[in-house]
C-alpha cells in the first residue's frame, strides 16, 4: 500500500476518529501527497515507507488487535516509523478496508 493507493480512494478532506475514539484527525489529499493533521494541530506528510510499515503491521496483527493504538507505539512496536502518527495511519488503513 502506498500514498498513491490511498489518495485514489479518498476525497480531498477526510476527518476520522482516532483508534480510541476520543479524538479526531483530518487527512488532506493533495494527490501525490497525504497530510495528516491531528486535533492538537500537529502535521505530518505521509511517505510510502511509513504507510507500508503500518500496513504490514496492521496485516500481521490479529483482527481483534488491529484497532488498538498501543499496538502501533512503544513498547509493543519498537520499530514503528513514527511515535505520534502511526496509530493515525492504522486508523486510515482500517477506514479504507
Image: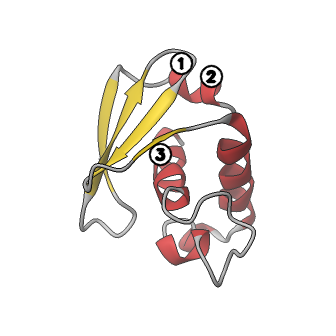
Distance from disc 1 to disc 3, alpha carbons, whole Å, reads 13 Å
Residue 1 appears in the picture as rendered: no
**Is residue 34 shown left or right of residue 27?**
right
Q: Position of residue 4 (x, y in %)?
A: 62, 22
Q: Are marks 1 and 3 in contact (CB under 8 Å)?
A: no
| CA gap, disc 3 and disc 2 | 14 Å
Q: Looking at this rendering, what residue extends furthest in the bottom direction?
A: 75
Residue lying at 52% horizontally and 50% vertically, measured from the top left: 89
Relative to 97, residue 23 above or below: below
* Mark 1 residue crowding within 10 angstroms, few (<14) / some (14–19) / many (20+): few
Structure colour scheme: secondary structure
Q: Residue at x 73, y 52 (%)?
A: 53
Q: Quadrant of the C terminus?
A: top right
The residue tagged with tag 3: helix, strand or loop? Answer: helix
Q: Quick check: 46 left or right of 24?
A: right
Give left or right: position of 37 versus 90.
left
State which tag comes first along the sequence, 3 or 2.
2
Q: What residue do we see at 26% from left, 56% from top?
A: 40
Q: x, y percentage for residue 38?
A: 33, 51
Does residue 1 lie above or below 53 as drawn?
above
Q: Which mark is residue 4?
A: 2
Q: Could you say where residue 55 lies in the image, as x and y percent from the top left?
A: 68, 50
Task: Say what secondary structure mark 1 lies in.
Answer: loop
Q: Which residue is mark 3?
A: 92
Category of crowding for the residue at label 3, using alpha-carbon neighbours closer than 10 angstroms: few (below 14), some (14–19), many (at least 20): many
Disc 1 marks which residue? Answer: 8
**Image quarter (top left, top right, bottom left or bottom right) of the N terminus:** top right
Label 2 CA crowd tier, 10 Å (few <14, some 14–19, many 20+)? some
Q: Nearer the viewer, residue 68 or 25?
A: 25
Amino acid at each position: 500500500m502506498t500514498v498513491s493507493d490511498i489518495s485514489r480512494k479518498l476525497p480531498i478532506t477526510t476527518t476520522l476518529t482516532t483508534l480510541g475514539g476520543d479524538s479526531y484527525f483530518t487527512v488532506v489529499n493533495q494527490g501525490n501527497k497525504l497530510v495528516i493533521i491531528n486535533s492538537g494541530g500537529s502535521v505530518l506528510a505521509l511517505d510510502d515507507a511509513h504507510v507500508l510499515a503500518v500496513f504490514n503491521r496492521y496485516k500481521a496483527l490479529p483482527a481483534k488487535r488491529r484497532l488498538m493504538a498501543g499496538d502501533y507505539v512503544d513498547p509493543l512496536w519498537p520499530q514503528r516509523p513514527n511515535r505520534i502518527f502511526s496509530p493515525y495511519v492504522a486508523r486510515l488503513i482500517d477506514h479504507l478496508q
